[in-house]
Image: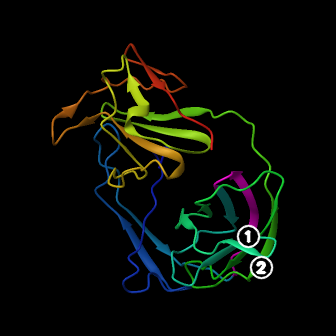
Amino acid sequence: MLDSKSVVLSVSTINFGLENMGRYTLVVEGVKDLNGNIIEKSIKDITPEDSKVPEILNLSAVGPYNILIEFSEPIKNTTSKTVEIKLGSTVISSSPILSGFETNQINIGLSNAMVENSKYDVKVKGFTDFASRQIITKTYQLTYKKNIEPVVAKIEKVDPAYVILSFNKPVRGLTKDNFYYGDSSKKAIGIYSDFKMTKTVVPSQSLDLVWVKFYDSILKAGNTIGDTQRELSILAMVNGYDLFVRDVKDL
């Protein structure tokens, strides 16, 4: 994770994951700190406990193409989930693009923009937590109002090969050509939506966190950013180079 001290352990769902209220032993061994020192072996008894039905805490528009649902707990990607969006009696979307699973924030991506000051009915059904408990089906009313807050980009981490970049709200239309450092010849060689940098971002996606790659050590392609400097800010100075974000537009 971005704090460099926490990790999320994902349990394979092939065998249905961990049993609710089951007893397990977690062993952490062979982990090194940033100085290369091996951290002492740790053994912990854990009991996964989930007795509550997931709830929707908030549903809001974050742009004409995006609705964000905040749940009370992380949500699993299942086939039971559905979102239906109506404007009056007309269904404008019954199969939107959903993303953000395994977190408590699910983004609903629409193919057509919502109309300012229009009222929409958003029916949310079948979303499930990791204990297989489903939310209560409910229809929410949402009035879309344009967010006039400017887009602000923040550099979360700088590595010699890549940069993690966050935005204060989802943006779309991103390509690797949006990013360079020093001068425009030092462009990014890829932009991704995951920390493994295997899921390439396409312009139609709406995202608020991206991994921008400048150097590929396997292909020996691109340009490294520098050595160890980690001063992070907008237009961050990285070993004498400014990192620019250009042509990033609001939703």
Quarter residue 11 falls in: bottom left
Asked if residue 59 is among those painted magenta in the image, a careful observer would answer: yes
In-image side of 52 versus 143 (left or right): left
Query: What type is the residue that disc 1 sits on?
Result: Ile
The single residue placed furthest to the top in the displayed view is: 240
Question: Which residue occupies the foreground of this view, 151 or 154?
Answer: 151
What residue is shown at x 41% (from left), y 43% (from top)? 211
In-image side of 109 versus 39 (left or right): right
The C terminus - image quarter? top right
What residue is shown at x 37% (from left), y 68% (from top)? 27
Q: Which residue is mark 2?
A: 138
- Element under disc 2: strand
Q: Position of residue 141 (x, y in %)?
A: 83, 67
Task: State the extent of the magenta-drawn residues as a range.
Answer: 52-65
Q: Which residue is mark 1?
A: 56
In-image side of 235 versus 142 (left or right): left
